[in-house]
Image (tube, rainbow, N blue to C red):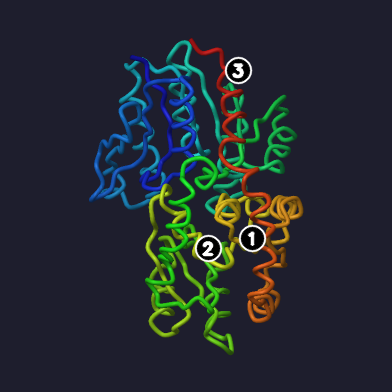
Amino acid sequence: MSIDLHLYPSYLQNESRILKITKSLIGNNITSNIHVVGIWKEKLKAEELIDDKRKIVRLKIHLYRYLPFFKTFFFRWEWYFKVFFKYINKEVRVIQCNSIEDLPVGVALKRCKKGVKLVYDAHELETEKNTVDGFRKKIVKVVEKRLIKHVDKVSVVSKCIADWYQREYKIHKVYLIRNIPYNHFRSTLSDERVENIKNEKKIRKKFNITDDEMVFLYQGGLMTGRALLVWLEIFKNLPSKNKHIVFMGYGYYEIEIQQYADQYSNIHLHPAVHPDEIHEYSVDADVGLSVIENSYLSYYFCLPNKLYEYILCNVPVLVSDFPEMSRTLHELKSGWIINPTYEEMYKFINEITLYDIKQKKALCNNVKNKIGWHTEEKVLLEMYQGLGLK
């Protein structure tokens, strides 16, 4: 049986976009055998079944431990070689690369295997993201420019990024597949279950937050560029501690956030939860936080899936005044747009009232049935059908 490969050099623990895409391809009979290939680490399985048609394959990387110089270089190239030799003699039909980091091995496999189709699903503006700086940025730009010529279809997550790829590489069509979550409250849950989820109040019960106090929720990677340190200082300095911030996720700033949480009663850290369960927590918040700092062009053009996640859970969202996020909020009218500075962010948190939130929640309720992964799935299927697969 032929294999469709989805490559992404991560630990593949909560890659919600890849899970949605592969589920849609299976569910619509585009394919029946998918391997999602990433990187192994301790306590994770080398191979893990998602279901009877999808499998996660994590490859063990060792060489960089013995060659500390150019650690990232050896780490990446060892993964390339292991992916290449694992699948070079297997029947592969489609390869989907999900970042510039895995595009080289995708192109190598395509060129060595007759008839393989190659899809490039850029999760960011790949040559303008936070992991690409200085000399590395110059190399990555050259690599993407050369390799993208071998790609059969290109998809991205925001219109600004789509326009950039079309303009930069003279691509006739770039598919816009926004990273919108499933609308669980629209299609998969009964009215009774929806009410039960709302009444569970998982966040408030965990942190002993009362109904008359406000919950501001940040979900996602605890990394740079998300204004996390700014939020910590803001909630630390609020005159009243009846406004709480909850960070839900994992990453670089976990330890620092926990240190603040240990000192301040209105700052909390919650571990990441599975993408299929995250709506059960989001629904308990008053305001969702999706404020991004303008440190990279990829951030400036971004359209985070959390923006939609909050709205779908009837939670109004606060976003940066950047092109994609502000355009979406102007259309949906389900939140607030601010300049991502300490002064404006502090002013917003300090002055917002439960009445303000109630008004925005009503607007969320008006639009949440109009958005969801079902709208993006149509574009995904159109793109794959255009590959002419057999």
Q: Secondary structure at mark 2?
A: loop
**Disc 1 designates what residue?**
295
Kindly check if marks 1 and 2 are in contact, taking CB atoms under 8 A apart as contact: yes
Mark 1 vs mark 3, CA separation in Å: 36 Å
Q: Please, is residue 292 above or below residue 53 in the view?
A: below
Asked whether the viewer can see residue 138, the reply is no
Q: Quadrant of residue 353?
A: bottom right
Label 3: state its secondary structure.
loop
Q: Mark 2 sits on what residue? A: 224
Name the residue rendered at 41%, 63% in the picture.
Answer: 200
> How far is disc 1 from disc 2 in space, using C-alphas?
9 Å
Q: Amino acid at mark 3?
A: Gly
- The residue lying at 48 percent from left, 10 percent from top is 390
Residue at the spot of label 3: 386
The amino acid beneath tag 1 is: Ser
Q: Earlier in the sequence, mark 1 or mark 3?
A: 1
Percent position of residue 145, x then y = 62, 32
Give the mark nearer the N terminus: 1 vs 2: 2
Image coordinates of residue 89 in percent, x first then y, are 32, 16
Is 341 displayed left or right of 273 in the figure? right
- Neighbour tally class for label 3: few under 14, some 14-19, many 20 plus, Cα within 10 Å: few
